[in-house]
Image (tube, rainbow, N blue to C red):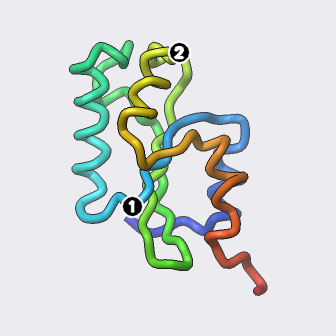
Amino acid sequence: MEATNFMDFKGAVENKEGIVLLGAGGDLKEWINGIADLLVKEGIAKVAANELFKEYYMLKTTGGRTDLALVFEPDSLHMGKMTMWRIRFGDCSWISDYTVNYEHHFIKDGE
């Protein structure tokens, strides 16, 4: 999986939601499948694991951290349960927050 430019990512996820796992190193497919399986097992997902994340993006920060964004349809999850899971998980952010709060972690085109 190739890293996505932050501005391309921001444009691609406009009006979409999901989670961004901060510092997701190693095999990203393993992260994607593992998180989807976990959300199904914990009764958070309303769909099968292989239907949960329609899009995903790998982002590399200026500090070298690999972040993994997983896009989902809000009606594919029990959002209250998902909110509590996200808080328990720790190092993750909603996409809508990430595009605002982490923008300074990336070099913009032309800089």
Give the residue type at disc 2.
Asp
- Check disc 1: other Cα within 10 Å, few if <14, some if 14-19, many if 20+: some
- Disc 2 secondary structure class: helix
- Check disc 2: other Cα within 10 Å, few if <14, some if 14-19, many if 20+: few
In the image, residue 102 above or below residue 43: below
Q: Residue at x 42, y 35 (%)?
A: 53
Q: Which residue is drawn at 36% across and 38% down?
A: 89
How many labels, in total?
Answer: 2
In which quadrant of the rendered view does residue 78 lie?
A: top left
x and y percent of residue 50 in the render? 29, 30
Viewer-nearest of labels 2 and 1?
A: 1
Q: Residue at x 50, y 78 (%)?
A: 63
In which quadrant of the rendered view does residue 54 lie?
A: top left
CA–CA distance in space, label 2 to label 1: 27 Å
Give the residue type at disc 1.
Gly
x and y percent of residue 100 in the render? 72, 52
Left or right: 80 as drawn, with respect to 41: right
Please tell me which of labels 2 and 1 falls first in the chain.
Answer: 1
x and y percent of residue 75 in the render? 53, 15
Left or right: 69 as drawn, with respect to 35: right
Q: Which residue is at the front of the view, 15 or 101?
A: 101
Disc number placed over residue 40 in the picture, else none? none
Residue that extends furthest to the right in the rendered view of this protein: 110
Quadrant (top left, top right, bottom left, bottom right) of the N terminus: bottom left
Q: Which residue is at the front of the view, 30 or 54?
A: 30
User: Which residue lies under the disc numbered 2?
Assistant: 75
x and y percent of residue 107 in the render? 67, 78
Q: Residue at x 50, y 40 (%)?
A: 19
- Disc 1 secondary structure class: loop
User: Which residue lies under the disc numbered 1?
Assistant: 23
